[in-house]
């Protein structure tokens, strides 16, 4: 999951904008047909010993480029990967600035 946060500051309020991109792959209990096809494709690669448990976290790291891609896994999982983007905007009042003067 990738998250980008931007804060825009005004005179008395600030806006925080966050965007998340989550990599989704078929799950055995939700999409059994797609899961079975993905497993079959991965079995045909040199990477099968590394991902034989269909470790979704390992596949996500390979997809995002955070891990090596043994046996061309990215190409095999490409049509199964979905990216879910979520954007959120929140507003809040700014805290009063500390002027640094003591009373």
Image (spheres, rainbow, N blue to C red):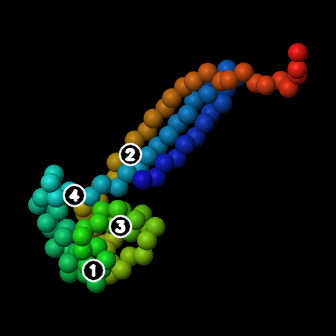
Where residue 9 appears, x then y in whole percent? 66, 30
- Is residue 79 something that shows in the picture? yes
Lower sequence index among marks 1 and 4: 4
Marking on residue 41: none
Marking on residue 85: 2
Lower sequence index among marks 4 and 2: 4
**Count of number-bearing discs:** 4
Instruction: Please determine whether, in this image, residue 86 is positioned above or below residue 92.
Output: below
Left/right placement of residue 68 relative to residue 51 reads right
Marking on residue 58: 3
Element type where label 1 sits in the image: helix
Lower sequence index among marks 3 and 2: 3
Rendered residue at 16%/73% (across/down): 40
Mark 3 and mark 2 residues within 8 Å of each other at the beta carbon: no
Rendered residue at 27%/80% (across/down): 49
Rendered residue at 30%/62% (across/down): 56
Element type where label 4 sits in the image: loop
Where residue 58 appears, x then y in whole percent? 35, 67
Rounded to the nearest whole Å, what is the CA distance between mark 1 and mark 2? 31 Å
């Amino acid at each position: 999951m990738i998250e980008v946060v931007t804060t825009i500051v005004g005179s008395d309020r600030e806006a925080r904008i966050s965007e998340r991109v989550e990599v989704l792959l078929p799950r055995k209990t939700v999409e059994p047909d797609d899961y079975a096809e993905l497993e079959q494709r991965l079995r045909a690669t040199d990477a099968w010993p590394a991902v034989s448990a269909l470790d979704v976290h390992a596949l996500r790291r390979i997809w995002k480029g955070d891990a090596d891609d043994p046996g061309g896994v990215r190409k095999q999982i490409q049509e199964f990967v979905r990216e879910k983007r979520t954007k959120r905007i929140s507003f809040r009042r700014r805290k009063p600035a500390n002027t640094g003067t003591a009373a």
